[in-house]
Image (spheres, rainbow, N blue to C red):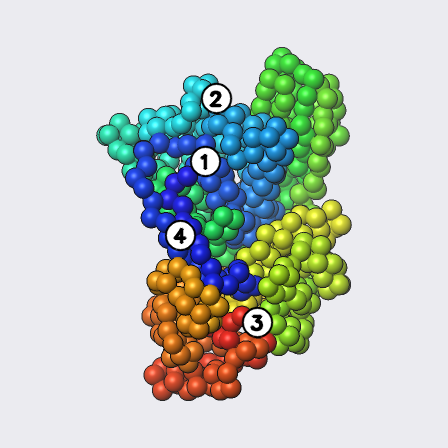
Amino acid sequence: MRNRTSVAEPHPPDQNGLRAGDGAPRYPEPVPDVFTADDARHWALLTRAALAARRTEIDELNVFPVPDGDTGTNLYLTLDGAIDDVVATHGARGVLGTADLVEECRTLRRAVLMSARGNSGVILSQVVGGLCDVVVEREAAQVDTALLVECLERGAAKARASVAHPQEGTMLTVADAAAAAARRAGDAGGSMSEVSAAAVEAATEALARTPEQLPALARAGVVDAGGAGCVLLLEALHRVVTGAWSADDRLLTTAEDLGRPEWHAAAGPVADAGSSDDAGPDGPAFEVMYLLTDTDAAAVRTLTTALDRLGDSLLVVGGPDLWNVHAHVDDAGAAVEAGIAAGRPERIRITHLPSQVAAREEVVPVGVVAGAAGPGVATLLEEAGAVSVPFGPGRRISASQLLDAARRTGASAVVVLPADPDGLMAAEVASEAAAGDGLEVHVVPARTTVQALAALAVLDPERSVHANVVAMTGAAVSTRHGAVTVATKEALTWAGVCHPGDVLGIVDGDVAFLGSDLADSARDVLERLLSAGGELVTLVTGEDAEAGLAERTAAALARERPEVEVVVIDGGQPVYPLLIGVE
């Protein structure tokens, strides 16, 4: 396991994404310049977390080949479904978490093909599948630098070969650029971290150039959505290679954790994408997807030719016993019949594309569900029109609770603000389950109470659902958070050994310092949070807060930074006398 940290806690993990004793580091020993089975598992989880955090933002970039706003969701669900399948398969075999690299890759290669969703998900399945092919063919127990270069090249080549009519300015272009840069760095004798860094840099630069290659992107003022997902995958790889992945076992991440590349160009708003010639009203009406079994190579070639005549965005990938078929066509029945003639279609999905595009910009009432760490927070949320879901130590939010709350909003589109890292994972599960009920649920990665409040503040009923999700996500992830609490037992923290009664100053989830006075420590936390600037400070008092704590803190801030606005909320949350947010 690469660069793992151990946490000793004076108090169990709480509902605000903060841990009173977070941070006892176990300093990593030097590791060989290789990529192991453990690293592969960490990479898959970190990539899934990155896609989950930024899926709505990637959805907003989606204007090619159809502006239906689902690329980020499809990328996330593709990898999420594949990981679930791998976990189930290895769990049944009794090798969960202990499978060797070849077995991990063999299982993932098939799983990601079966779970691929949409045009972008199928291409992602080929990028990942190409990486896995190299490991399986070589029976590699671990990947060294030279083999990593070959893996990246194979993934890019397999993705490009999967597309019937490749288009530059897409995910294919970004993957090719990354592979070429990795080869140059590898041939120059670069280390694994230098190779992965070169791949990320080249991919990011290629992504920035995609509007120059696709008029639809230039008109919309965005970069390619699939290419953005590819950059996240490579950034996650670099994090694992260098040991800079999250210390949290769940590997949850937010947008800032993997960088914030400028994905929106200056050409104009996303809404202008409707004028795209590639995705206009004359394009194919249906997206058809299915898995195909009981076939052979000759039948697949015949199927590919038939589907190519019916429409575009054609992908027929896989083999020899399982194929994933994707096409945009006007005659969905003919596309399915061609599959029946070629073999046995399964998991058939047909989507009416014009309806999906129209729904993206339609302004519909938006419901909000938010986690409430205390009764005061719950009252505030409900006064703002949200349905609150209470939680606290030993009482985590469940997916079923969130799903029930989403139904109680009475809205067809619902935004969920978990306000808790564990709740974030539960919210993603609820979102998937809601789709089966015809309920559209979007998850904003608000991991703390102050982030949830910041997101709720920018909700605009006059905006489309997707525009609200992007705005709320931006507000949440740009809100820095901190807190003060009192240690209940001796423990090792990032700031040293704490003892019962010590005040812990927490900044962005980590214990930054030890103090003796709550008010002094609160001011110190604020000073650190405001070091990067800020216009609005939110102070949320807890049930055990001493009288006047928030008021004294606000008064001191007014003297030192009169330009900063301060809002005080009686939250009533346990464990933390004061939660602090800076926007």
Q: Secondary structure at mark 2?
A: helix
Image quadrant in which you'd find residue 211 = top left
Sequence-first tag of 2 and 1? 1
Q: Secondary structure at mark 3?
A: loop
Answer whether labels 2 and 1 touch (C-beta < 8 Å). Answer: no
The residue wearing badge 1 is: 38
Sequence-first tag of 4 and 1? 1
Q: Residues within 10 Å of mark 4 (few under 14, many from 20)?
A: few
- Mark 4 or 3, closer to the camera: 3
* Residue 393 position within the rendered picture, expressed as x and y whole percent measured from the top left: 59, 64
Q: Residues within 10 Å of mark 3 (few under 14, many from 20)?
A: some
The residue wearing badge 4 is: 259
In the picture, measured across the screen, residue 397 lies left or right of residue 252, that is: right
Mark 3: amino acid: Pro
* Residue 59 position within the rendered picture, expressed as x and y whole percent measured from the top left: 55, 49
Cα separation between marks 4 and 3: 33 Å
Which quadrant is home to the N terminus? top left
The residue wearing badge 3 is: 574
Q: Residue at x 39, y 59 (%)?
A: 492
Cα separation between marks 4 and 1: 24 Å
Image quadrant in which you'd find residue 204 = top left
Answer whether labels 3 and 2 touch (C-beta < 8 Å). Answer: no
- Mark 2 or 4, closer to the camera: 2
Which quadrant is home to the C terminus? bottom left
* Residue 269 position within the rendered picture, expressed as x and y whole percent measured from the top left: 50, 57
- Mark 4 or 1, closer to the camera: 1
The residue wearing badge 2 is: 136
Q: Residue at x 68, y 21 (%)?
A: 293
- Mark 1 or 3, closer to the camera: 3
Foreground of the two, 440 or 16? 16
Foreground of the two, 237 or 396? 396
